[in-house]
Image: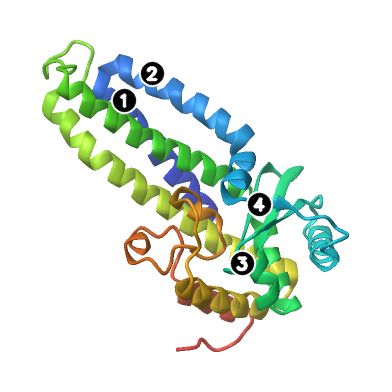
Amino acid sequence: MSNIFKTFILLAALTALFMVVGRAIGGQTGMTIALVMAGVMNFMAYWFSDKMALKMSGAQEAPESQFPVLHSIVADLARRAGLPKPKVYVVPQATPNAFATGRNPSHSAVAVTAGIMELLSRDELEGVLAHELAHIKNRDILISSIAAVIAGAISYLANMAQWAMIFGGFGSSDDEDGGFGFLGAIVMMIVAPIAAAIIQMAISRSREYLADATGAKICSCPMSLASSLKKLEEWNHRRPMDVNPATAQMYIVNPLSGKNLANLFSTHPPIQERIRKLLEMAGQPAVS
């Protein structure tokens, strides 16, 4: 199953779960309200996710006069990928990492931390930026934003259900409106947020693999990306970034990878597996 088809199936499952939770809590009316909420939140994610991501990360627009090499690399890779040059930002953090954001290629941005430019060689930095441009080319930012919004909404509905239960807001199991009843709602409150988180993680992981493959083709050097991933993973284990956990999925490697609890719910595939796939693309033997 291709990563693109897998993502479509997972997004459909996440939307269906959202509607089921709405039905469990409020019957047919609740499911309709949940569907409307999903539409509104997806619209908001489409238009504002890039601004929110940049603000939450503390990214600052990088003037070309101060970062000529960075702008040169981004411009060259964008040309090779057939994309408009995205805006370029720098995050004032020493831990090396990077992310991309934007609703489409014409409204996109790439951001790197200050530390990444000190750690990586030019070829390795090209590999990282090619990976981020691949996210833009594959519309991954939009997909991930929609998944995050729906998963967050499911958790919000479950929280609302808890308050409704406290104040006697649930009807009986034979409600004409079609609700699942008291026990069904309790099950949904517990299971739905966990299921939503698992689906969201699966979506994010499939898009990372696809971005690695696309990025390696853009920069024509899978080995550069594989080398940079190894270095970034080691540094983020040593010095985890100070970021909002909700934004961790945006980064090329998990910025919370040094925190054991956060790693249990990682939105990133195992770095060894990502490197193995890139080595296969380069025709190199896997490193044990």
Residue at screen point 47% across, 42% down: 147
Marks 2,3: beta carbons within 8 A? no
* Callout 2 touching callout 1 (CB < 8 Å): yes
The residue that label 3 is drawn on is 213
Residue 287 in the image: x percent, y percent? 50, 88
| Mark with earlier residue (1, 4) | 1
The numbered disc on residue 33 is 2
Q: Could you say whether the residue bearing mark 4 is in a helix, strand or loop?
A: loop
- 18 above or below 91? above
- What is the CA distance from the residue labelled 2 to the residue labelled 3? 39 Å
The quarter holding residue 121 reads bottom right
Q: Residues within 10 Å of mark 4 (few under 14, many from 20)?
A: some
Contact between marks 1 and 4 (CB within 8 A): the answer is: no
Q: CA distance from mark 1 to mark 3?
A: 38 Å
**Residue 201, can we see it?**
yes
Residue 267 vertical position relative to residue 16 in the rendered view, above or below: below
Of labels 3 and 4, earlier in sequence is 4
Camera-side mark, 2 or 4: 4
Where 49 falls versus 130 (above or below)?
Answer: above
